[in-house]
Amino acid sequence: MKGTRTEEEQEALALSQAELKKQSMQEVRRSLPIFPYREDLLAAIHEHQILVIEGETGSGKTTQIPQYLLEDGYTQGGMKIGCTQPRRVAAMSVAARVAQEMSVKLGNEVGYSIRFEDCTSERTVLKYMTDGMLLREFLTEPDLASYSVIIIDEAHERTLHTDILFGLIKDIARFRSDLKVLVASATLDTERFSCFFDDAPVFRIPGRRFPVDIFYTKAPEADYLEACVVSVLQIHVTQSPGDILVFLTGQEEIEACCELLQERCRRLGSKIAELLVLPIYANLPSDMQAKIFNPTPPGARKVVVATNIAETSLTIDGIIYVIDPGFCKQKSYNARTGMESLIVTPCSRASANQRAGRAGRVAAGKCFRLYTAWAFKHEMEESTVPEIQRTNLGNVVLLLKSLGINDLIHFDFMDPPPHETLVLALEQLYALGALNHLGELTKLGRRMAELPVDPMLSKMILASEQYKCSEEVLTIAAMLSVNNSIFYRPKDKVVHADNARMNFVVPGGDHLVLLNVLEIRYFYHTARLSKGGYKTVKHQQTVYVHPNSSLFEEQPRWLIYHELVFTTKEFMRQVCLLRLGWLLEVAPHYYKSKELEDSSSKKMPRKQGKTKEELG
Ligand code: ADP
Ligand code: MG
């Protein structure tokens, strides 16, 4: 019969299938824990301007609330509903899911906006975006007039941008009485949010939580990666059906763990049931990311190896077992030296409890903590320190200054940043010429704020006009803005990758490697050769050239570096050699010639290091 259907019949069949899919999607929507509270929630939003919403991860806050608001008429007259996410992956993935639920094309009625990628159109009324993107929207629309509702989602993550949004949105809500503000959070810290927003009521969505048995190790694990692999395989062969979620700290670890698992499964062959190994981390291509949501085929088991993105931002159905080594990668910042470090540290108890909670969403679950009960009680912090207290504030200070907020000391911070960090940010912006000596925004500073990049990069881009090298500098800035993802270095092809990179090496340094051209760039980060390492000019801090740098062996006298990171040592990343004359030319207000005198020769610049011409 198959081949004999008419076109009309086929069309009808396709339509009914689409209808079925839509129906089942609606059933899924109705089955979420938030659904029974739809009317009460809408009534509470109607009644209060600011509402804190608390609910377990997976209850439907992010995907459902914007749809409820849309159905209730909040987008009439072309008004938008904005929902912020701290993570890019979450913004994209959630928008895609909601577009699917509404049977619309992503980028039409439902869209997302993340740095360097805008997937919205004039028709977009539900807009998911990173918290950083909403912050930038204040520059063009200081009262957010085109929004009827702003949802600050994942508020408990307390990212720098979310914290700044709190202060700004609280402020505009005072004169935009029609604006609704929803602060959505996992079951953490909600009283503090309520308190900050002048005792805004808290709407609680009771979760459907099954009990989770927690197991600790008797002694600390020497190698938690290996311990994860062993635990996954043990669960796979001894425990009843249910998927596994493993929390690791970053791409490298996740790749290593996935490889080890695949390797051992191959060796075991048909002795064990099929194990689907799926990674998820921020830089994973989005089609690979989507795979974690595919249902597990009968008879097989899925193991998702994730960063803490799976802690609260994304919900994967079907997880029964969680493996938690108890670590995360955390940024910290030393305001005295300007050193930013990304270090693997024990996660907080609050994080560990969120992770365990992932095992109890669909049925009773088990969480295997690869640390001792003692460590949980005594070595872990109660909660994670907000990012604002452990990061560089240059960007945010420039943004606030351009919004006309001059008095940063009295800005309405939920938790204020350390005084030193604020002072260092102001000093950096002064050095770059973005602020004058009174701390006021300069014309240059205003232009710098419009560019969505680090102040040092925006200065470099604007300065390139004068030196007629904008095209080259833009290329370099673009590459520096995407961190280290230009030179992909997969674990199993390290030698190949390094050889390939060597083909791009040219005299002068890493920026020129990124582009074969001489550049004039930001000048704030300078260092001079000194006793086996380098000393930063302004702070006399001992630092080293990163081994991945093309200048690692050459070690020129003077350098400019893009960033200072602490991994195993205090490393300068992306370095470029420097002629001293440049410093006095571009920043006479900041560098005094005395500071730049070479103590060994007592002579001024000219011959310090080799210039590009000398290197030929
Ligand atoms: P919350 O924000 O409260 O943590 P979400 O709205 O993100 O909850 O998720 C609600 C449910 O929607 C999840 O339990 C999951 O079943 C489903 N879901 C969310 N995102 C996706 C996705 N990208 N693919 C498939 N299902 C998803
Ligand atoms: Mg959510």
Image: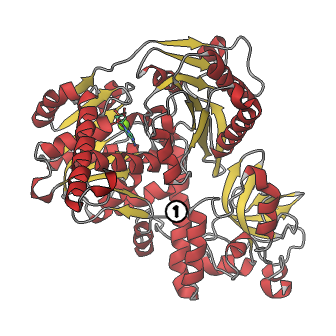
| Position above or below: 55 against 460 | above
Q: How many C-alpha atoms fall within 10 Å of the one at disc 1: few (<14), some, or many (≥20)?
A: some
Residue closer to the observer: 597 or 199: 199
Q: Where is residue 431 in the image (x, y as percent from the top left)?
A: 56, 66
In the image, is 557 to the left or to the right of 367? right
Residue closer to the observer: 510 or 167: 510
Q: Where is residue 333 in the image (x, y as percent from the top left)?
A: 60, 45
Locate the C terminus by quadrant: bottom right
Residue closer to the observer: 7 or 272: 7
| Position above or below: 332 against 381 | below
Q: Position of residue 157 (x, y in %)?
A: 44, 36
In this orientation, does residue 201 appear? no
Q: Residue at x 45, y 39 (%)?
A: 293
In this orientation, does residue 57 appear? yes
| Position above or below: 276 against 92 | above
Residue 468 found in image quarter? bottom right
Q: Residue at x 11, y 42 (%)?
A: 72
Q: Element under label 1?
A: loop
Ligand 2 within 8 Å, label 1 CB: no
Q: Residue at x 56, y 29 (%)?
A: 301
The residue at which mark 1 appears reads as 454
